[in-house]
Each structure stands twice: as structure tokens, then as C-alpha cells.
Amino acid sequence: MTLKFIGEVDNDAVGKISSVLSSITFSPYILHITGIGTNNPRQPRVIWCEIADGGGSAALHATVENALAPLGIPRDDRPFRPHATLARVKQSDSSLPGWILAIPPGNLGMCTVTEFRLKKSTLTPRGPVYETLLEVPAS
């Protein structure tokens, strides 16, 4: 799940961002996967899992936003909605909507959020490569 997309920053900014994020404290919380969503039910291009967590992710998102704002990192324009992207569809398949609809909403899984991470992505011809720069544990 992405709490905050920061975008491209220079190495000096990465150090400041890491410093600010490492000072964040939060309590662990339980996250439930409640369903599968798409950007377009007839021809999905993005597929995600929907999340219910009693507001834990939204609270952590707000804390991250407040911590990064003094560094000049803009706040998100849209309201935060917890979800985790599962797939991006490059080529449409007519059977995909049926497969997605066959997954009934409900309790599809759960986990306890015990940390968040600052990730770096490097785009390559074979796809993005992700690297963890910082792990911030719950207190």
C-alpha cells in the first residue's frame, strides 16, 4: 500500500525525508482486505484490493503528510483511500472482468501493520526495480 507518493527527489532531499520519517511514531493496527476493485469494470487497467482498517492507514498517511509538508513536498490533492495495487493490465482480456467479479467481497485476508517503509523505484526497460531506503517500526 502506498501511503504517500513523493516523486523524484535528489539525494540531499532523500536524507532529509528519511530523517523526518524516522521520527514518526505510530501504533500497530490490523488491516483487512475486503474486496477487489478496478478502475473500469468492463476493461480493467488497474486492479487493487480494498482495505478496511478502522482508519489506521488514513491516520498514518496524515502523519506522513504533516511530516513532509515542511520539506516542501506537496500534500495530496485527492482524499486518501487505503488500497494496494495488485496489477496493471497492459493488454485487455475479455475474461478478466468475469474473474474479478467471481471474487466475492468479504474478509479476504488480514495482517498487522507493524512498520512502514520509504521505497526508491528505478525504472528500467524490464520494469521498475524497488529498493528499501528506510524502515520505520511501530512503537
Image: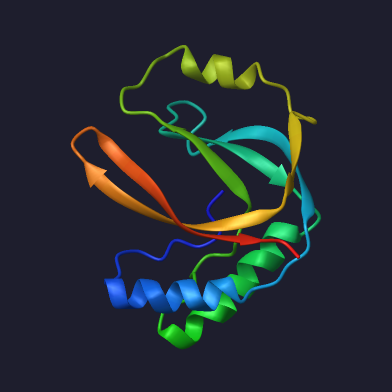
Q: Name the image quarter holding residue 32.
A: top right
Which residue extends farthest left?
125
Give left or right: position of 37 versus 105.
left
The count of marks equals 0
Which residue extends farthest bottom?
70
Give left or right: position of 91 versus 53.
left
**Residue located 59% across and 64% down the image:** 79
Colour setup of the view: rainbow
Q: Name the image quarter holding residue 73.
A: bottom left
Q: Is residue 6 above or below residue 117?
A: below
**Residue located 42% across and 27% down the image:** 43
Give left or right: position of 122 versus 31.
left
Q: Is residue 63 above or below residue 122?
A: below
Residue 7 position within the rendered picture, expressed as x and y whole percent measured from the top left: 35, 64
Towards the viewer: 114 or 47? 114
Residue 138 position within the rendered picture, expressed as x and y whole percent measured from the top left: 72, 61
**Residue located 76% across and 65% down the image:** 139
**Residue located 35% across and 21% down the image:** 92
Q: Is residue 47 above or below residue 134?
A: above
Residue 134 position within the rendered picture, expressed as x and y whole percent measured from the top left: 49, 61
Residue 101 position within the rendered picture, expressed as x and y whole percent measured from the top left: 62, 20
Give left or right: position of 63 versus 71.
right
